[in-house]
Image (cartoon, rainbow, N blue to C red):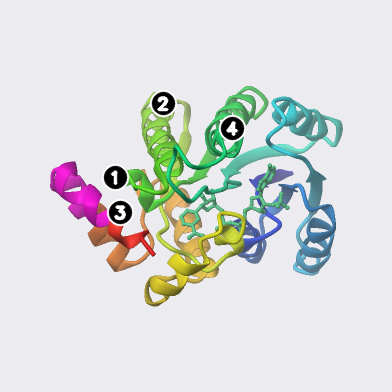
Amino acid sequence: MNYTLITGASKGIGKAIAIEAANRGMNLLLVARSEQLLVDLAKELSAKNVSVKILAADLFDADASKKIFEFVKEHSLNVNMLVNNAGMGFYGNFDEGDLQNQLNVMKLNMDACVRLTYDFLKNSDATQRRYILNTVSTGAYQPVPKMSIYAATKTFMLFFSRGIREELKKKNVYVTALCPGGTETEFFVPAKMEKVIKKNAAFMMLPDRVAKVGLNAVMKNKSVAIPGGINMLGAIASKLLPHDLVVPVSGSIFET
Ligand SMILES: NC(=O)c1ccc[n+]([C@@H]2O[C@H](COP(=O)([O-])OP(=O)(O)OC[C@H]3O[C@@H](n4cnc5c(N)ncnc54)[C@H](OP(=O)(O)O)[C@@H]3O)[C@@H](O)[C@H]2O)c1
């Protein structure tokens, strides 16, 4: 039976992707640290007549991906879709913030995704079509002062997605970068960004909309999906205009 492995499935966009995927009849392997949230979600989604497995794992751990794919083997799951969604932010000036927190953002948003992607490609059925959906961000399109590390990790993921997409084209692997703008989730709580969110409340999207756009895009083999017209315009402007002009504007959005 085919399974979709979703990281960061306990909350926010990952949870919304899990709900949308279950609505589409997809079997799921849900991964995050909060085991009880996964248990509750699995119970809710199993009522939709899909098989839902859960695995509590901390993706800061360099061995996490290996453990996840050991679980996949043990339970004979045929994982044909990987959703690299778990991620975290850091808000504040680079030199004033805690270095380890900022290195952790890099670990989770980049290293963990790279490891999972590699292990997925090595441990999935290459005779079948396979799918990779990476939750990136509109932050990937330009440097973002006060979120310099975060935005850089997302640029890495956008370029990584586009690069391997081309490499894997002939192997029937669809790779999509989902680039949401501000979305109403708990993302901003650990990053201590409540004031920024209040200021930009009018532009926030709901996670279920983002999830639908992402799953539609990967099924249609789109390279990138940017949910919302304003987010799309922002990304286009950031691509067309020189960064010397764009960066002060992106900085002002995140200034409080
Ligand atoms: N919200 C936005 O405005 C926005 C915009 C653009 C892109 N994004 C991206 O969307 C993705 C999801 O974020 P979200 O907004 O849904 O945030 P969220 O509500 O905070 O959810 C983050 C998810 O990642 C999991 N996670 C965090 N650290 C983890 C770790 N060390 N190991 C395993 N799982 C971990 C969390 O689960 P546990 O805490 O249970 O581990 C949770 O399920 C991220 O990649 C983020 O960068 C968000």
**Location of residue 185 (image quadrant):** bottom right
Q: CA distance from mark 3 to mark 4?
A: 24 Å
Q: Which label was assigned to residue 158?
A: none
SS for dot 1: loop
Residue found 64% across the figure and 25% down from its top = 119
Tell me if mark 1 has few (under 14), some (14-19) or many (20+) residues whose alpha carbon lies within 10 angstroms of its own. Answer: many
Dot 4, crowdedness within 10 Å: few (<14), some or many (≥20)?
many
Q: Amino acid at mark 1?
A: Gln
Residue at the location (65% across, 47% down)? 6
Residue in the foreground of this view, choosing between 215 and 145: 145
* Eye-nearest disc, 3 or 1: 3
23 with respect to 245 (left or right) = right
Instruction: For marks 2 and 4, give the CA distance.
Output: 30 Å
The residue depicted at 45 percent of the width and 46 percent of the height is: 136
User: Which residue is at the front of the view, 128 or 162?
Assistant: 162
The residue beneath circle 4 is: 107
Q: Which residues are magenta?
A: 236-250
